[in-house]
């Protein structure tokens, strides 16, 4: 068994939870056991560093969690970690526990926190992208995105059953405060008539034209998938405007909300989390820091954390075109 010079690392989940985080923690813990490094699980993200809520995790302590949603270490948004005093407390606790590196599983906010911490105290860290939004630069997929997508399309399929039975127009809101990835893919996969995302300049005129064309082409129901952060308006405002324009339509709204965050991770998310967890530990062993482990074209890649934080994944214009073609 290979032996590393690094003796002990910590792992935490931070920011919003996403399905597959448990699988990532498990991979980190088991990779540490494989390379004979001690692994410490930190509870409640950065808050746990400050409150010294840490305990050693052995390979068997992460049994039966690869299939579970959420994060058993729990996650938090820590206000105190944003202060110098809070971070000093965190560093002292890490020193007292003999922790020499950190794996941070979370979104860009969590990576920013880790960067600030690294600049101040020099603690090496590797980020793993865990968020359902898929909006992190440096990886084709973030952990949780695929599960959220599958949950969304299952729900939209059910909504369609009702829509077709009643000749209804449904506005379905999916998660994505600043990003339309979930909306675009779930919209294509569920055969949505229109997909409204913050990255595109949508207009009510275009939306109404699409609905009208849909009716003229013989469709008796329509699903419009709307990202949470759509700039044209929220689903309730859009539904109201549609009712006003087409008084004869039976318009309904469904907000999918937090069901998209929960549930057992899909196979894809479990494998992604397993790969990134092992890669993060190996990177720390190799003396790397300030990087995010990601997957591009099915290969593990490391992206400078500043790029992961500052750059943005672009929406695939080909997918937008496909959505339009298929809604004919
Ligand atoms: P999500 O994408 O789900 O929102 P996130 O990782 O972006 O996840 P945030 O709430 O933005 O979530 O960040 C998580 C935590 O990271 C914050 O609660 C805070 O403790 C820490 N953090 C974020 N930005 C900074 C910063 N500039 N300085 C110190 N800590 C920070």
Image (spheres, helix red, strand yellow):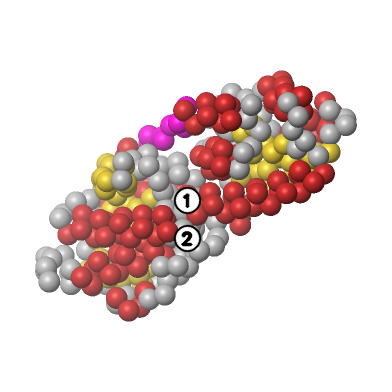
- Quadrant in which the N terminus is drawn: bottom left
Using the image, tell me which numbered label, if any, was put on residue 146: 1
Q: Is residue 8 above or below residue 287?
A: below
Estimate the x, y position of residue 116 in percent, counting from the top left.
33, 48
Give SS at disc 1.
Answer: helix
Q: Is residue 197 magenta?
A: no
Using the image, tell me which numbered label, if any, was put on residue 240: none
Give SS at disc 2.
Answer: loop
The residue closer to the viewer here, 130 or 245, is 245
- Quadrant in which the C terminus is drawn: top right
Residue 88 visible: no
Estimate the x, y position of residue 240 in percent, counting from the top left.
80, 34
Estimate the x, y position of residue 174 in percent, counting from the top left.
61, 45
Residue 274 visible: yes
Q: Quadrant of residue 239?
A: top right
Q: Is residue 52 above or below residue 296?
A: below
The residue closer to the viewer here, 204 or 77, is 204
Estimate the x, y position of residue 101 in percent, counting from the top left.
24, 60
Q: Residue at x 60, y 43 (%)?
A: 190
Q: Which residues are magenta?
A: 310-317
Tell me if 127 is positioned left or right of 283 in this view: right
The residue closer to the viewer here, 308 or 247, is 247
Tell me if 184 is positioned left or right of 224 in this view: left
Q: Earlier in the sequence, mark 1 or mark 2?
A: 1
Residue that sits furthest to the right in the current view: 248
Would you name the residue on which mark 2 appears? 265
Q: Residue at x 46, y 58 (%)?
A: 266
Residue that sits furthest to the bottom in the current view: 60
Whether tag 1 and tag 2 are in contact, CB under 8 A, the answer is: yes
Q: Residue at x 79, y 40 (%)?
A: 168
Q: CA distance from mark 1 to mark 2?
A: 8 Å
The residue closer to the viewer here, 15 or 283, is 283
């Amino acid at each position: 068994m290979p032996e590393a010079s690094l003796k002990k690392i910590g792992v935490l989940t931070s920011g919003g939870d996403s399905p597959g985080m448990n699988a990532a923690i498990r991979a980190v813990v088991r990779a540490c056991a494989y390379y004979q490094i001690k692994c410490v699980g930190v509870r409640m993200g950065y808050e746990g560093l400050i409150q010294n809520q840490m305990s050693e995790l052995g390979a068997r302590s992460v049994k039966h969690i690869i299939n579970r949603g959420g994060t058993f270490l729990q996650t938090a948004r820590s206000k105190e970690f944003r202060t110098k005093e809070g971070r000093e407390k965190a560093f002292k606790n890490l020193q007292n526990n003999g922790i020499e590196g950190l794996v941070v599983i979370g979104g860009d906010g969590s990576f920013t926190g880790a960067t600030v911490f690294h600049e101040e105290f020099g603690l090496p860290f590797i980020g793993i992208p865990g968020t359902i939004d898929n909006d992190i630069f440096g990886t084709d997929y973030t952990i949780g995105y695929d599960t959220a997508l599958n949950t969304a399309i299952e729900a939209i399929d059910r909504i369609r059953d009702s829509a077709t039975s009643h000749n209804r127009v449904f506005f379905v809101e999916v998660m994505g405060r600043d990003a339309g990835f979930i909306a675009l893919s779930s919209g294509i996969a569920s055969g949505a008539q229109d997909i409204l995302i913050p990255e595109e300049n949508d207009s009510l005129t275009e939306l109404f034209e699409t609905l009208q064309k849909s009716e003229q082409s013989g469709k008796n129901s329509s699903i419009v998938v709307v990202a949470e952060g759509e700039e044209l308006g929220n689903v309730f405002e859009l539904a109201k405007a549609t009712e006003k324009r087409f008084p004869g339509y039976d318009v309904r709204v469904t907000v999918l909300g937090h069901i998209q965050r929960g549930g057992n991770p899909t196979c894809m998310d479990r494998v992604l989390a397993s790969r990134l967890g092992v890669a993060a530990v190996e990177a720390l062993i190799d003396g790397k820091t300030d990087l995010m482990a990601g997957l591009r074209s099915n290969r593990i890649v490391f992206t400078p954390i500043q790029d992961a934080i500052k750059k943005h994944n672009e929406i695939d214009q080909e997918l937008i075109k496909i959505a339009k073609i298929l809604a004919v």
